[in-house]
Image: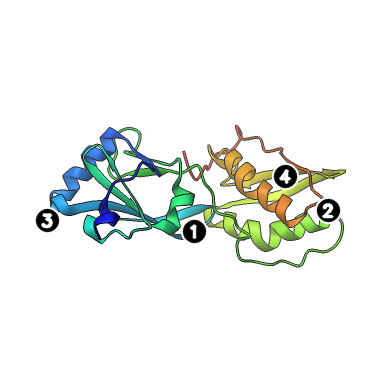
Amino acid sequence: MADAITSTDLVVFTVTPEAVARILELRQAEDDADGLALRVEITGTSGVEYAYDLSFDPLADADEADAVYHQGDLPVVVPAGSIEHLMGATLDVPAGGGAGLVLRNPNRPDPLSGKHLELTGDIAEQVTQLLAQQINPSLAAHGGFAELKGVEGTVVYVTMGGGCQGCAVSAMTLRDGIARSIREAIPEVTDVIDTTDHDAGENPFYS
């Protein structure tokens, strides 16, 4: 599979130099370390975030459809099915020099993916049903919730509370996840406005 292990120009996600150094140090403890690549795959969702699997796999086992590239001296493999949802992400060490690695991914899963909901009533009633049936069960994994504050014409006003209030990424969650889901499920909605006071929360689930 010579073609499968040839580096491409497609850099799916960036690995910082600090993370590369840490990963290469960990790789040295593995058998046949020089032939191993860091493989990063999206395995599902966890609340409003993706779930990931990071492993050392033989570079020669990469599939032809996978993205294979280098970050410094570190070969990286991203399975074909994970490429789209890892584009633009950054793998780094934690702020403050803690143990482990942090994958900062600007992409968010669609909570409505593969689901069909029967929404009835006016816009306010449909948004309330959507929040209750699909969106809030996902947010509950982080102790958060979203609720409808009002509707003006085709503009919907939503606020986030619990673990979502004060969260450093909750505004992104609303914009990229909830707002998109509302507009896709209820085509009449033209805009979704975040009315959350993000400075008031005390229990963010991400920092």
Residue shown at 46%/44% (left/top)?
87
Give left or right: position of 109 versus 8. right
Q: Which residue is mark 4?
A: 158
> Mark 2: which amino acid?
Ile
Give left or right: position of 71 versus 169. left
Contact between marks 3 and 1 (CB within 8 A): the answer is no
Task: Find residue 73 and name its label.
Answer: none
> Mark 4: which amino acid?
Val
Helix, strand, or loop for circle 4? strand
Q: Spatial distance from mark 3 to mark 4, Cα to Cα?
A: 53 Å
- List x then y, in percent, for residue 193: 73, 39
Residue shown at 29%/58% (left/top)?
62
> Mark 3: which amino acid?
Asp
Q: Spatial distance from mark 2 to mark 1, Cα to Cα?
A: 28 Å
Q: Which residue is mark 2?
A: 123
Contact between marks 4 and 2 (CB within 8 A): the answer is no
Q: Spatial distance from mark 4 to mark 1, Cα to Cα?
A: 23 Å
Say which label, 2 or 1, has the lower sequence index. 1
Say which label, 3 or 2, has the lower sequence index. 3
Q: Neighbour class for label 3 at 10 Å: few (<14), some, many (≥20)? A: few
Q: Which residue is mark 1?
A: 45
Q: Relative to the observer, which residue lies in front, 204 or 192? A: 192
Which quarter shows the N terminus?
A: bottom left
Whether residue 21 can be seen here: yes
Helix, strand, or loop for circle 3? loop
Q: Which residue is mark 3?
A: 32
- List x then y, in percent, for residue 195: 71, 37
Q: Spatial distance from mark 3 to mark 2, Cα to Cα?
A: 59 Å
Helix, strand, or loop for circle 1? strand
Say which label, 3 or 1, has the lower sequence index. 3
